[in-house]
Amino acid sequence: MHEMGMALSLYESCREEVAKHGPGRLEKVRIQVGELTGIEPELLKFAWEAVLEGGGDAGCELNVEWRPAEQFCPQCRSMKPRPGSSWIITCPDCESSLQVQGGYELDLVEITFESAEEGDQA
Amino acid sequence: MKQQIDVKQRLLADNEKAASELRDGFGRYRLLVTNLISSPGSGKTTLLEATAAALGHTLRLGALSGDIATERDADRLRRMGIPASQIITGGACHLDARLVREHLVNWDLESLDILFIENVGNLVCPTSYDLGEDFKVALLSVTEGDDKPFKYPGIFARAAVTVITKMDLLPHVDFDIEAVRTQVLALNPVARLLQLSCRTGQGVDAWCRVLTDELDQKRVIHD
C-alpha cells in the first residue's frame, strides 16, 4: 500500500523531470532508501513495475540504493559498528549514549532516459 | 540519444512542502499539534478520551482521527465533548499532510489550544509522513511485547514521547519495561517515556503535564 503510493509519486516526479528536457522514454531511475523509512525495496520495485506496466515507460529499471542508519558516539566522535540490523545500547568503548544518524533517505538521485528528439528528426 | 539527469530530490517533497505550510499555520495560531502513532488497538483513542476528561475543562482540544474505515473514533471523541473529524483513508495505511490540510479547511484553528492527530493504526507507514506536528508520540501497549522498539526503529527513533499503555495488564503479561526503555533510549537518547493506564488513571497526569509544558513552550516561542 505504502510502496504503491510511493511508486506513483516517484513516477510523477520522474516524468516531470524528463519533461523539462523534452519528450523521452525512461530507461533507468536511481533512488536512495533509508532503513528507517519503512520502505521495503523489493515491494517498491514490484509496485514500480505495476505502475509502469502497459505504458510508454514499461521496463524502466528501478535501482534502489539501500542506506542503513548508523550509530555515532559523540564522545569518541566516531561511528560504532552495529550488530547486523540490530542496535547497540551504549558505546562499547566509553558507554556514552549513541546518536542514530542517517536512515531517513528517500531521494530520487538520477534519471536516465532516451530522448525522443533525435528519432523524430531522423 | 541517451541522457542522464542528476536530480537529488526528496521523494516526499510534495508532502514535506504541505507539512511545512501546516506547521507555519499552527505556529501562527500558537496551536500545539501532536501526531499519535501506534499499532491498531494500542489505545490512541482511549488516551485521547482520558486526555479530554483531564484537560477538556481548561484547554480547548480538537482531534483528527485517521482510519481506513468508519467514523467510530471521531464519534467517541465527540462524545467526550471535543471537536473531532474523521479522515477515512479508504485503504491507505497512513495520513499525509495534504489529507490533513483538506480536513482542516473548515476548522477554526484559532479557537484551539491542542490538536491531536490520531494516525491510522500502523507502526511503519505513518512514520515517514510529516504532518506539520510539533512532535510525534508513539504508543506501545504491554500486550504487544517488549521487543517492538528495535523491530520498528523508524517510529521509536523519531517519537519525542513513547507512552507504554495498558499498564494495568502488566501483571498478566511478560513485558519488561526496562528492556523497552533501553531500546527506546538507544534509538533516541532524548526520548521521554511514560507508563500509563487509562483504566486506573496511572500516568495520565504525567502525560497531561507533557502536553501543558509543550504548549507553554510553544506559546513562548511564538509570542
Image (spheres, grey):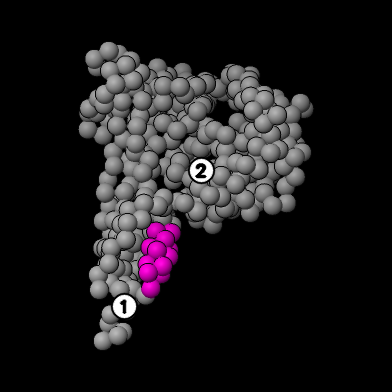
Residue A47 coordinates in the image, percent (x, y): 35, 60
User: What residue is drawn where x is 53% and y is 49%?
Assistant: B17
Residue A72 coordinates in the image, percent (x, y): 31, 25
User: What residue is drawn where x is 30% and y is 27%?
Assistant: A71
Q: Taking the image as drawn, is residue A107 in sight?
A: yes
Tag 2, which chain?
Answer: B
Does residue B26 sit above or below A92 in this rendering?
Answer: below
State the residue lying farthest toward the top: A94
User: What residue is drawn where x is 69% and y is 39%?
Assistant: B28
Read off the residue under disc 1: A116
Q: Main secondary structure of the magenta part?
A: helix
Tag 1, which chain?
Answer: A
Which image quarter is the N terminus of chain B in? bottom left
Taking depth in this image into account, of B73 and A16 the one nearest to the observer is A16
Foreground: disc 2 or disc 1: 1
Does residue B84 sit above or below A10 in this rendering?
Answer: above
Q: Amino acid at mark 1?
A: Ala
Kindly indicate the quadrant of the structure image that contains residue B44. Answer: top right
Determine whether, in the image, residue B52 is placed left or right of residue B168.
right
